[in-house]
Image: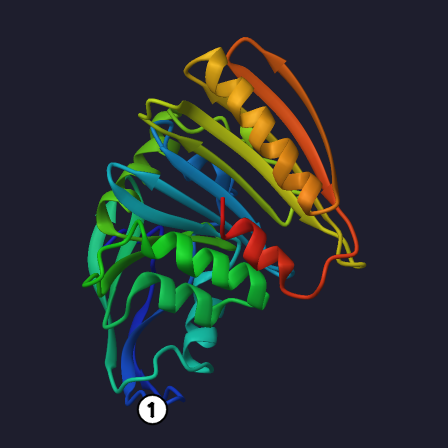
Amino acid sequence: MNPIMVKAVIVSILAVSGGLSGFAALNYYSASQTSYNIDTFVPANSTFVAHVNSGTTSVIAFSANNSLGFALSMDYTSFLNQLNNTSVSATNHTINITYVGSYDGFTIFALSGLNPVSLLVSTLNISSNISKYLHNTSYKLIPANATTIYIVPIGVQDMLLGLPASIYAGISASHSGNYFQYSNYINQNANVSFFLRLNSSLFSMITANITLTPTGNISLNAYVNFTSPLYVAAFIASASLLFKNLNASFTYHADNTMISFTANLENLPSGTLSKFIGQL
């Protein structure tokens, strides 16, 4: 075990509410004092990147090497406390946290017994609308039988968690400097901001920022790179009709195969955000 990253590991049994019998937790102390930018742990070859503002915690989801990972602005000790004080499953499971090893100077733990998304949504303070969207989107990217995830403390205030391949890719990205150019595509001030790279006959890339105002209005700003100007024209016709039916303002700019557009949906009923982004 890397003495710089972990100076003491204590095995303890912590009670978990909601029917869980408990879990064996490796309590992490004396973290590295090095300051890291958590954005640099998103690999450059990520095909999907999303930033979610949960109010108290920023969550970055990414898919790399056919594996989903999460970068969190939450320290390891707080994560364990949240896990210990919340119901993370409706079924009776014993959750175990074990030491895996170190990679490029970072200590890796394995948590078994839960699906990664169930764990993430249950232990973070995420609003109901955002959690539903994260839940529905992530389950499409995670195998249904995935019950073991890796956890990596990053410095003193951040961490990675996800399937093993994504964790190793994330650490390698930061270590090598070959990471996703986060600021070029992601707006951290939006409630939800995402980037999607596809091998599709219709389009190759989508970026979108979704912001919900306190009055219930939704602002959507997006860029889509289609594979043909004909698809751009078809999209404009369809989107114009869609947003007209939603009583929303819709403005766009098309340049060959690239289109940028903004839509503002006002005076929407409760729950519209989750329904709207669930269609994206």
User: Type of residue at label 1?
Assistant: Gly
For disc 1, the marked residue is 19
Q: Position of residue 15 (x, y in %)?
A: 36, 89
Can you name the residue that lies furthest to the top here?
Answer: 256
Q: Position of residue 256 (x, y in %)?
A: 54, 8
Mark 1 residue element = loop
Q: Position of residue 131 (x, y in %)?
A: 51, 63
Horizontally, residue 6 falls left or right of residue 147, namely: right
Residue 126 seen in this snapshot = no
Residue placed at 23% from the left, 73% from the top?
Answer: 113
Residue placed at 76% from the left, 53% from the top?
Answer: 213
Residue 74 seen in this snapshot = yes
Residue situated in front as seen by the camera: 270 or 93? 270
Q: Position of residue 99 (x, y in %)?
A: 22, 63
Question: How many marks overall?
Answer: 1
Q: Residues within 10 Å of mark 1 (few under 14, many from 20)?
A: some
Residue placed at 30% from the left, 43% from the top?
Answer: 105
Horizontally, residue 140 falls left or right of residue 231, namely: left
Horizontally, residue 188 falls left or right of residue 142, namely: right
Residue placed at 55% from the left, 57% from the top?
Answer: 275
Question: Is 257 placed above or below 149 here?
Answer: above
Instruction: Name the image quarter holding the N terminus.
Output: bottom left
Quadrant for residue 258, please give it: top right
Residue situated in front as seen by the camera: 280 or 126? 280
Residue situated in front as seen by the camera: 95 or 184? 184
Question: Is 271 placed above or below 198 here?
Answer: below
